[in-house]
Amino acid sequence: VRSRRQRQMCIRDRRTPEGSQLVFAAAKGPRSKGVSELRIPANAGIAGVSLGANTAMWVREVGRDNRHYSDADEKSGYQTRALLAVPLRGPSGRTHGVLELLNPFGDAAFEEWHLDAAQMVSAKLATRLG
């Protein structure tokens, strides 16, 4: 998946009661250091909706979506315009977190193949997580 600018993986922190927080365990992109180890409520934002519903989310205009957790943008200094969120669901059915892809290059929009590729990567990551 080469056309994304920022990608990050949020993992459910099992040390919190009922995995109530997501921690940004890995990030790559222009503001990756700004989100490293950032914590958000597990039910917050589009990542939280994706995690709770156990389904992929594709948001073309994040600024128009009231589910967007803007605190993460404020803390990282990154402005999210478009977002793909895919749950990290392991073979046992356990959901470990969410893989997010943010802002395709230029004025491009995410396309169906981006979602397909993100789901494949998410499945591989989730298998490694157990």
Image (cartoon, grey):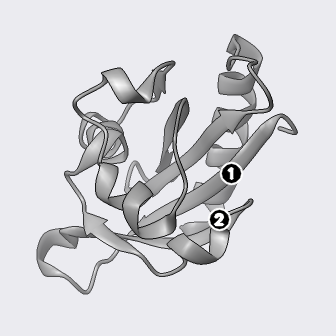
Quarter of the figure with the N terminus? top right
- Residue 96 appearing in the image: no
Tell me if I can see residue 34 in this picture: yes
Q: Are marks 2 and 1 in contact (CB under 8 Å)?
A: yes
Judge the density around disc 2: few (<14), some (14-19), many (≥20) Cα neighbours within 10 Å.
Answer: some
Q: Is residue 72 left or right of residue 43?
A: right
User: Taking 93 as reference, is 120 left or right?
Assistant: right
Measured Cα–Cα span from mark 2 to mark 1:
7 Å
Residue type at tag 1: Gln
Residue 113 falls in image quadrant? top right
In percent of width and height, residue 24 lies at 48, 70
Name the residue beneath numbered marker 2. Answer: 31
Q: Is residue 50 above or below residue 15?
A: above
Q: Position of residue 83 (x, y in %)?
A: 53, 33
**In terms of secondary structure, where does tag 2 sit?**
loop
Outermost residue to the right: 2
Whether 3 is drawn above or below 78: the answer is above
The residue lying at 22 percent from left, 29 percent from top is 66
**Three-letter code, disc 2:** Arg
Q: Which residue is most to the left?
A: 17
For disc 1, the marked residue is 6
- Which mark identifies residue 115? none
Q: Relative to 113, does residue 40 appear above or below in the rendering?
A: below
Name the residue located 63 percent from the left edge and 45 percent from the top edge.
123
Quarter occupied by residue 28? bottom right
